[in-house]
Amino acid sequence: MAFRVQFFRLIKTLVDFAASLKTGVWILAAFMVVVFFGTLYQVDHGLHAAQDLFYYAWFTPPISQWPAPDAVSVWARIAAWFPVPLPGGWLVMWALFINLSLSMMRRARYAWRKAGIILAHAGVLLMLAGGWIAHLTAQEGFLSLAEGDRSSFALAYEDWELAIWDDTTLPEEAPYTFSANALTAGKELALEELGLVFTVEAYYPNARPHQESPAPGEEPVLNVTGITRLEPDLRRGDPGRYEPGLQARAQVAGHDPQRVIFHASDPMPLVLSLPDAQWYLHLRRRPMPLPVTVQLLAFRKVFEPHTTTPRSFSSRVLVDTDGVQRELVIEMNRPFRYGGFTFFQSSYGETEDGRDISIFAISHNRVMWAPYIATGMTGLGMLIQFLIQWIKPRRKKGGTVS
Amino acid sequence: MKHRLLVVWPLLAFLLGAGRAVAYVQPAEGEPAAAEAIDLDAFRRIPILVDGRKMPMDSFARNRLLQFSGRRQLDRESAVAWLARTFFAPETMEDVPLFLIEDPEAAQAIGLDPPRRERHTVGAIEAVLPRLEEIVHAAAALDPDDRSRVDNELLRVYLNITEFTELTHAFVFARPVDEFMVESPELRNRLGLDPEATSFSYLDIYRAGAGLRPMVQRISTTPQSEWTPLEEEAFALTLTLYNWSQFYEDLVFRIIPKRAGDDEHWVSPWEVLSGQVSDPELLEALNVLQTLFRAYQQGDQAAFDQAAQVFRQVIHDRLPGDRDLKWIDLEVRKNDLNPFVRARVFYVLAFLFALGALFTRSETEPASRVSTVLRWIACGLCTLALVPHTAGLIMRVLIMGRPPVTNLYGTFVFVAWASALLGLIAERIQRNVMGVLAGAFAGVALLLISGYFAADGDTMGKVVAVLSSNFWLTTHVMVITLGYAGCVLAGLIGHAYLIGACITPRRSSLLDALQRALYGVLGFGWIFTWFGTMLGGVWADQSWGRFWGWDPKENGALLIILWVAILFHARFARMIGPVGMAAGSALGIIFVMLAWLGVNLLGVGLHAYGFTTGLAFALNVYIIIQLLIVAALTPLARRRLARM
């Protein structure tokens, strides 16, 4: 009995601590540290490395363990006297979420004069929850179309896959796909229908290809461009620009096993001729099926006269939604939204035959409404509370200015 | 700047190859001297396209002079007078101290030996040009990261010299020169040239091309020994005409607009004269420019004004309905008024009177009569300062067709205005001098900082496509800069509280009033920074497809929000008292400055639009001083209040 009392007392103490205003202040301070150091870290390492190490991490290793930048770093100099790990973004944001939730349950007084505070904090909770869900579920990709071309698939920005298809199917509808995340060393990928077994030897999220003459007696390597060796590229940067590479051993029934290499730079799939059909194998960005088919009718870019300052980029597109066609313009600050997907005018290029290419960034985010509502709730809450605080002392003074 | 270098280097190479970096075309012998004091009002209202923006010649002159010399006017000569002389009488520019070399080491490297930063005359630069070219050639071949400070400074100076040289050659087509001398009266007659003159301009001879053509045709089929003296002279003229067209064809000084459909294109005189652009109306425009040139040379005010008016009309006619052209006169008016400098003067006076009111306040309430009068004067002066300040902002809005916050300069001017206005509102509520004191101080300090960014040249340049949204500029940028204004003003009130607590700890009513003002203004700043940041997220979501990307600018704004959140929550949790709140608000200015300027200095991220070198040092010095002030005042204020 005494144990139970003590246990519940301990729980209560912990909950009180987690819900306290002072704890909230320290969490906010920790958040500032994460944001401050993460921002400085971007200077040498770029945004994505900072995201991995600070914002989307539970803990940030001690400064002394941070990857050193190219030059002698100021971090290296101060690391000696700052050997403790820092909290990561996830940790402080979750701690803030818990602190806010508990304090709203235990400490908040639900009265009209506290409406502003409650609304503002509820907005922050929604913002944090929305951010977390978006991080887990949102997909990003791009769609590159030359004038006249159409497509109902975008390409994922960071996700890659090994796709296998035959003459009878379209590449986007490949019957066999293996996500790059599953391509770990030693993994066997068995395609019984084809009598084909792949054994993954190595998968590098970012790999440098090498084309070398095979040494005498060395096992030949199968690759469409003659790549014979892959070397991991450990430089950090924008994961969307990574060029992954896969080295595997392929075993076709009745044949000797053969080493095969796939690399992001392969311009075409590897062709495997089997008695029944030709099969195609390609390491590629994962296609994202779109709810519409988009055809680029015309792309237009306008610059300020005699400058390289862009005035506007815009694409006139024909959108086909289940047979219903409509023409619309996608341009900077004017995206097109449909079925949870958003199409943004992102960039442009040119084909070899001189046709304009328009590049759209594609985002699929089911909780994209969350930050909008959260912003409104928090802002409105702050405003209400500010007005209540401002009016209160004036009333006390009988309406006169203090 | 990098883009600018890319654009200018090919031209630079051409000019170096041609070996005429600062060599002027010598005027024909006996040519009239430049006009002594011609009124340039009509000339300065001529529109010109610079970096994609149409501006009056007056603004172009000011910006270029600032770029070359670091000043907006020479000793006794306005910028536009300097520009007119550069165009129409470049031979008189020899002794003008025009080129500022900031780094004495750079000056020493080319054989000039000043003890400090100095402006060097055109003649002095011309004398050391070979050495300068040698260094610049070597520096240009280096990777930009490998260039030394001296290399960069000399490259900058050399680009200025190149641009100045272009300007001196802008009207060379209209200048009578000995190379186009026609001594034979018969030839002058045949070509339809002025029978009284002997030297002519390129344009004169170009127009006489029809008369030259039959002679040149005969020459081409006749041995040279059979040429008549007249034909020999015609041949020489034709050859010079050809040489000039080859020599100047790359001289791009675009001054005449040409619209084809939606596309606007401006052409240089040489594009017209070399036949790259064919349009008889353009040739007419060149005739007007020649009239302008001659009228200046002859000091003929009436003809000069008329030619300037006609040319201005030509531009308006060629760009009917153009919105930018409508505001050219207003920009000239704004340049003349210099509203932000006027506002600065009033803010300084308001600040001084507010200080006077503060020091003449008695320890006991109510305030003394003198103090009250001084406070009223300070409020009046601060209100007066807001008149030109507001007018200047409105003019910027009209001229640019955008909210007044398209660049760092604009944000400082706007935040100065908002801070002064907020200070006055706080003063209206509190009536204890502190509002007007802080508002006037913020007004003058931020306008002074804005002057730093104005030194870059044009402060109303075009914005890139993604910023080209008046809705988002108005909502996101204006709201967040209002948030900055609130936080800065709260920081200043925080300083006032700390100083007040140290000097007059007994004045509890004043300190309480300051604390209340601090809460109000800081709350205002917090709310607006929150809204501004989140609206930025909405804009980013609309433009780039993500609400939050941990971009340095976003993080900077988040730091302000978190800092103020900490202050308010720590105060409610009684972790800090009024002194801590004041100290925290004062330190909050550091976060505002980091968000506003610091992240731009990092040079990374999508918002690195206002990248400025040289500012980092000033920002670091400010942060250290700010920390020292707070570190010194906070414990002292706490001790003094504890004794009460």
Image (tube, helix red, strand yellow):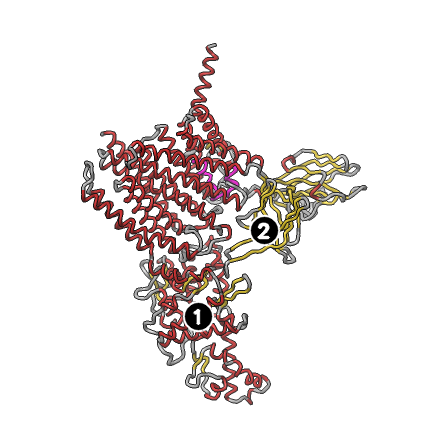
Q: Quadrant of the C terminus of chain B?
A: top left
Pointer 1 local density, CA inside 10 Å: few below 14, some 14–19, many at least 20 = many
Q: Which residues are magenta?
A: A32-52
Residue A38 located within the stretch drawn in magenta: yes
Q: Is residue A19 left or right of residue B634?
A: right
| Residue B13 shows up from this direction | no
Query: Residue shown at 40%/39% (left/top)?
Result: B527
User: Based on the displayed image, in which of its 4 quarters is residue A251 positioned?
Assistant: top right
Q: CA distance from mark 2 to mark 1?
A: 39 Å
The three-letter amino acid code for the residue at tag 1 is: Phe
Residue that lies at the very extreme toward the top in this rendered image: A1
User: Based on the displayed image, in which of its 4 quarters is residue B157 positioned?
Assistant: bottom left
User: Based on the displayed image, in which of its 4 quarters is residue B147 positioned?
Assistant: bottom left
Residue position marked by numbered label 1 in the rendering: B311
- Asked if A165 appears above or below A385 in the picture, the reply is below
Residue that lies at the very extreme toward the right in this rendered image: A275
Q: Chain of mark 2?
A: A
| Residue B220 shows up from this direction | yes
Q: Is residue B553 left or right of residue B216?
A: left
Residue B209: % across, % down: 52, 80
Q: Chain of mark 1?
A: B
Closer to us: B530 or A41: B530
Closer to us: B554 or B310: B310
- Asked if A393 appears above or below B50 in the picture, the reply is above
Residue A59: % across, % down: 49, 32
Q: Quadrant of the N terminus of chain B?
A: bottom left
Q: Main secondary structure of the magenta part?
A: helix
Residue position marked by numbered label 2 in the rendering: A329
Residue A345 located within the stretch drawn in magenta: no
Q: How many marks?
A: 2
Q: Contact (CB < 8 A) between labels 2 and 1?
A: no
Residue B227: % across, % down: 54, 88
